[in-house]
Image (tube, rainbow, N blue to C red):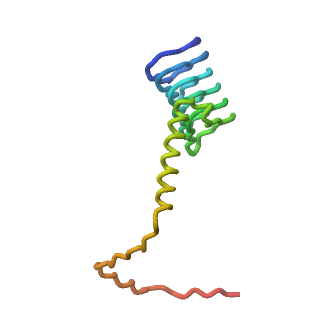
Amino acid sequence: MRGQVSGAEDVVVEGRIDGGIKLDGSLHVREGGVVVAQVAALDVTVAGILVGDVIANGAVTIAPKGKLVGDVKAGRIVIAVGGAMRGHVDTTEEATGAARGKARVAESREHLRDARDAFSSPSRPIERAESTAPVPPRPAMVGKKKLTRKA
């Protein structure tokens, strides 16, 4: 298929698409599928071949037999063992969208505030709990030989 593909649903490619893809949903390029296009989608999973730049608000995942040639701008990228990619990766806030970046900054500030509160509180002694469970005996060494090195 040649041309532009756009929509709000997920798209699964098992054949070939040449052109451009713009989705509010996810793009899945299956094994044997080939996409030669500029891609903008929520998430992108590549098990086949994708040639072109990718912008994903969520994640770009390259499966074990997947190949991606092009630049990637995404919130995160996962490349499985055996997967391959050639291009640049950008996971900055500018790449993934300002709204998502603001949420991440707010969440980080909360974690920092919690950590600061935890470390600024007066220290308390650590209480050790005594175990009532019996300690199992060490197994005897049976059948072990001392190995010597011959010069």
On screen, 80 above or below 118? above
Horizontally, residue 7 falls left or right of residue 38, namely left
* Residue 78: x %, y % from top left: 55, 41
Q: Residue reaching furthest right?
A: 151
Seen at 62% across and 31% down, the residue is 94
Q: Is 15 in front, or is 127?
A: 127
Q: Residue reaching furthest top?
A: 3
On screen, 7 above or below 130? above
Seen at 57% across and 41% down, the residue is 79
* Residue 92: x %, y % from top left: 62, 36
* Residue 49: x %, y % from top left: 59, 29
Seen at 52% across and 39% down, the residue is 104
Q: Is 91 in front, or is 31?
A: 91
The image quarter containing residue 97 is top right
Quadrant of the snapshot with the N terminus? top right
* Residue 13: x %, y % from top left: 50, 23
- How many numbered marks have been drawn onto this rendered protein structure? 0
The image quarter containing residue 140 is bottom left
Horizontally, residue 137 falls left or right of residue 110, namely left
Quadrant of the snapshot with the C terminus? bottom right
On screen, 71 above or below 138? above
Q: Residue reaching furthest left?
A: 132
Seen at 52% across and 45% down, the residue is 108
